[in-house]
Image (cartoon, rainbow, N blue to C red):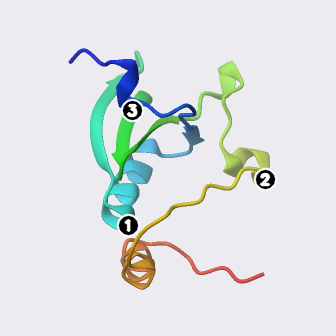
Amino acid sequence: MMQTFDEFHTITPQLTVRGAAQAILFYEQAFGAHELLRNFAPDGRSILHAELLCGDSRFFVHDEFPEQGALSPLSLGGSPVTFHLYVERVDDVFERAIAAGAAVVTR
């Protein structure tokens, strides 16, 4: 599949996560994301690159690769990054995210 620049917005986030396959499944179940492609690392298990579409926005997800300095928030002890997801029926999406395994955190 040949991609063109008009399929992307100005900024495209790339997420480094521990357990990319599980994260992708969560994004699909919780937020209705659709996986567009998945490339595996040479080990045949780790996800080197996955592209997802959520609403009209694309984002990338890949597993941690500590040997390359690609660490997830779990390895770093948190993340300074926040993503905002705009949806029409926030209560429905909130409940779907909880059903998919999200934890409610109040600060």
Q: Is residue 10 left or right of residue 105?
A: left
Q: Position of residue 10 (x, y in %)?
A: 55, 31
- First of labels 3, 2 by sequence position: 3
Q: Is residue 25 above or below residue 19?
A: below
Task: Kindly report the distance in space between the C-alpha atoms of the residues bearing marks 3 and 2.
Answer: 24 Å
Crowding around mark 3 (Cα neighbors within 10 Å: few <14, some 14 to 19, many 20+) is many
Residue 30's label in the rendered image is 1
Q: Is residue 48 above or below residue 30?
A: above
Please report the residue visible at 69 percent of the width from the left and 48 percent of the height from the top: 73
Residue 38 position in % (x across, y down): 32, 30
Q: Quadrant of the C terminus?
A: bottom right
Q: Label 3 sits on what residue type?
A: Ala
For the residue marked with disc 1, what is the amino acid? Ala
**Which residue is drawn at the image coordinates 38% and 78% (left, top)?**
89
Decide if residue 46 is on the left or right side of residue 12. left
Residue at label 3? 50
Residue 28 lies, in percent from the top left, at 32, 57
Residue contact between numbered discs 3 and 1, judged by CB atoms under 8 Å: no
Q: Amino acid at mark 2?
A: Gly
